[in-house]
Image: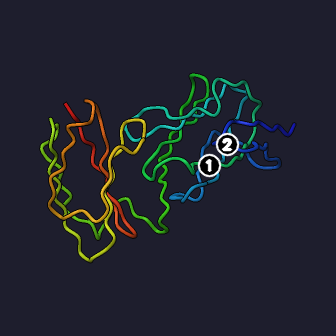
Amino acid sequence: MIKRTFFITILFSSLFVMKGQTIMDSLSINPNPFQNRTSLTFSFINNDTVSINIYDVIGNIIYSPITNSVMPSGIYQDSLIMDSYPDGLYFVQLKLSHRKTIMKKIAKSNTAGISINATNLKDLKAYPNPIKDKLNIEFTILETENIKLKLFNSQSQLVYSIDKPNTKQEIDLSFLASGIYYLKIQDNSEQKVVKIIKE
């Protein structure tokens, strides 16, 4: 098998074909959750037209390192580098022509040991939802931690943030355009994300 190297902008480094392993249609990410970088391993049993897409939590493609590339059957490994992207949930899709699609959820966090299903942060409420101008936020925290509140748009860009918000707080978001946003509350080890619609 021929070793191939691709240079794919900032997210992917060199791509290697691995030898001597059983080949099947698969996609794996390790470690996951990860801080800034993780390793992708993907394979397919036949020569195929391959695409890899990275999606944000609302289903928008934020990056496509491989698009409709004809590639030989094999096992490939590469690094996914997401230093410049905000913490949160993403999805990696391996698409093999029209015959198969494999999707995996990944979690990026610069805090070691983060849990997406938080136990320290409880009862997060954001209302009304949809909103027009002001959003009310309520949450319960079991222990005093360094709480941060961040709001991202559908392109995963940070549009608003507060350090150490009150457990009950009203936020004026009248300056934002209509659309879908994601509110993230996190402490030193955990986070919760809520989808917000602005009319």
Residue type beneath disc 2: Phe
Drawn side of residue 174 relative to residue 15, left or right: left
Secondary-structure class at tag 2: loop
Residue positioned most to the right: 2
Residue lying at 47% horizontally and 47% vertically, measured from the top left: 105
Residue positioned most to the bottom: 143
Residue lying at 55% horizontally and 34% vertically, measured from the top left: 63
Quarter of the rendering occupied by the C terminus: top left
- Sort mark 1 into few (<14), some (14-19) or many (20+) by Cα contacts within 10 Å: some
Whether residue 1 can be seen here: no
Residue type beneath disc 1: Ile
Q: Please name the residue that numbered disc 2 is placed on.
A: 12
Residue toward you, 72 or 186: 186
Image position, residue 172 (x, y; %): 18, 45
Do callouts 2 and 1 mark residues in contact (Cβ within 8 Å)? yes
Q: Which mark is residue 81?
A: 1
Drawn side of residue 70 relative to residue 193, left or right: right
In the displayed structure, 120 sits above or below 38; it is below
Secondary-structure class at tag 1: strand
In the displayed structure, 126 sits above or below 68; it is below
Residue positioned most to the left: 128
Residue lying at 12% horizontally and 43% vertically, measured from the top left: 128
Residue positioned most to the front: 175
Quadrant of the rendered structure where residue 168 is?
bottom left
In three-dimensional space, the C-alpha distance between marks 2 and 1, rounded to whole angstroms, equals: 6 Å
